[in-house]
Image: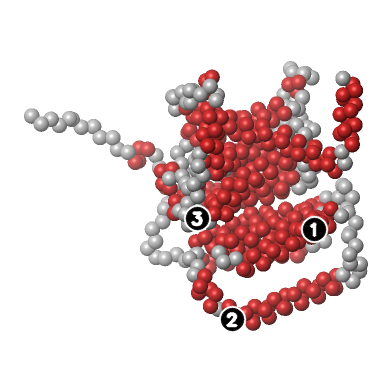
Amino acid sequence: MFQSILFYWIAFVVVVAALGVISARNPIHSVMFLVLAFVSSAVLWMLLEAEFLAIVLVLVYVGAVMVLFLFVVMMLDINVQRMREGLTRYAPLGIGVAVVVILEIAHVVWFKAQGFSLGVAPQPAPADYSNTEALGAVLYTEYVYPLELAAVLLLVAIIAAIALTMRQRPGLKKQNIAKQVAVRAEDRVRLVKMKTEKEE
Amino acid sequence: MGGLMDSMLATWLGIPEWVRELLIIVLKIIVVVLPLIICVALLTFFERKVIGYMQNRIGPNRVGPMGWGQPFADTLKLMLKEIIIPTNSDRFLFLIAPVLSITPAFAAWAVIPLNPEFVIADINAGLLYLLALTSFGVYGVILGGWASNSKYALLGAMRTAAQMVAYEIAMGFALVGVLMAGGSLNLGEIVMAQQGGMSQWFMLPLLPLFFVFFISGVAETNRAPFDVAEGESEIVAGFHVEYSGMAFAIFFLAEYANMILIAALTSIFFLGGWLSPFEGMPIVGDSWLAEPSFFWLSLKIGLFLFCFLWFRATFPRYRYDQIMRLGWKVFIPITIVWIFVEGVMAAMKIGPWSV
């Protein structure tokens, strides 16, 4: 009973936050709504006893990705008026994409729901069940190759991003960090002794 | 007397069970948070005293005996001051930013075992929970800096965002090493894995990770020498330049609460938490000195807090690009190498982590 009230309340917050992301006037507010949506979804996962996924969602998306998002959005000088002009032109495309996404999700849900009876809560796991351990056991045994493939894919993406943005302009002045670290006081300061000059 | 006790017990049992559970949880939280706030107040006092003596001064000594009343006088002053909200600032975000920075600093204490028995929430994924919460703290700073609608505050917020994201990675990797050595994500079990005297503490086998973790912790809390977020000499006071009164005090409280948190985490992960350093030594025998207790944890926390203050009195502030270099090009490679070393040793069954 208590859990279902919690579920519907959090689900309501997720939906409101998701609507807030696309309707907020200020891009910073949009980003914060997205953070709220992520945190609330994490709570939903927690209700499903998937605590590892819930915490990783907060850790990765809220803790790192959204911070960088916020970082970029804060730097942008966004002209809201200009952004609005394109709405009628892009709306059909956006609606089309949304319909495809909804159809895909509905299809998967329908497919997965074959064996389940709707409206019945799943049995809670026993107390000694650790979601983290269970996930690790599956990931590193049965799915170890897909996992490593995904890791390599991410590595390639990182290297590609760095390679694309690393452009060395000729004549660029750079700091030689090793030289800076190795410097000693004697190299920087020259003490000069001289006789006092007096005006006779 | 017995009658009174019985009637009290009867009233207690008369309350519905879920209310009783709730009351006990709230009581536990108060037992942790209230002393924490008092510790923060005392820490500000000790900071000024310690740095004072290190710089050949006396430090505050006017309010109360030997100046002990100073932190409370400061608190009272900050409470009575007006909170000024700048025009053209984002009112809502401006006011919620301090709250966002203090909440994770306190909420993290939920999974920290204070002695062998007491922990508010004994959860399996305690270490992950801590990582998630410490990464949450950056929002308060960024939003506070942006909502102030001030150039200095925005600059401070930018610096913090980049710095905290960078050092979080090093911190997370250092904790991966701890997790491999401890074999659990539960903080109590990590402490138990270090049982058996000082030589078993993770500080020795994980020495590089210990240094990386603590230094990253100093950077995460924006303390000197990594305090470019505040950099008085460049950007006035950084992200909280527009804050006054209690709104400022909450940022202040959050910074010090985070310091205590990092000190506690370092003691738990690398110094055996509430375990006694004299454990198993024949000299002290079976006396309380060999028993694990909160006393040892508080002693270790105190040691690291002193290091925080010591650093501030000793080191000049890092240049911004040097901070970034240290985080990305020095700490992260060190942690990755040490995790690899640990993995190889564990596979070859060498060392304390070979289970």
Distance between mark 2 and mark 3 Cα atoms: 32 Å
Query: Which label is found at residue A7?
Result: 1
Which secondary structure, mark 1? helix
Does residue B14 show up?
yes
Q: Earlier in the sequence, mark 2 or mark 1?
A: 1
In the rendered image, which quarter contains the C terminus of chain A?
top left
Q: Decide if residue A135 is in sight here.
A: no
Q: Position of residue B80 (x, y in %)?
A: 53, 37
Q: Quadrant of residue B206?
A: top right
Place of residue B22 in the rendered image (x, y in percent of width and height, measured from the top left): 80, 41
Residue B223 locus on image (x, y percent): 53, 40
**Which residue position holds label 2?**
A88
Which quarter of the image is occupied by the N terminus of chain A?
Answer: bottom right
Q: Residues within 10 Å of mark 3 (few under 14, many from 20)?
A: some
Give the residue type that dot 1 points to: Phe
The residue drawn where x is 35% and y is 37% is A186
**Within 10 Å of the Cα at label 2, are there few (<14), some (14-19), or many (20+) other Cα atoms?**
few
Q: Dot 1, crowdedness within 10 Å: few (<14), some or many (≥20)?
A: some
Q: Amino acid at mark 3?
A: Ser
Gap between marks 2 and 1 measured at Cα: 36 Å
Q: Considering only vertical position in the picture, is B282 above or below B354?
A: above
Q: Residue B125: horizontal and vertical position, in percent? A: 76, 47
Left or right of B7? Residue B105 is: left
Up/down of B290 relative to B137, above or below:
above
Along the line of sight, which residue is nearer the eye, A43 or B289?
A43
Q: Residue at x 84, y 53 (%)?
A: A2
Which subunit holds the residue at mark 2? Answer: A
- Residue occupying the point 59% across, 61% down: A29
The residue indicated by pointer 3 is: B89
Give the amino acid type for the residue marked by disc 2 in the picture.
Thr
Q: Nearer the viewer, mark 2 or mark 3?
A: 3
Q: Which subunit holds the residue at mark 3?
A: B
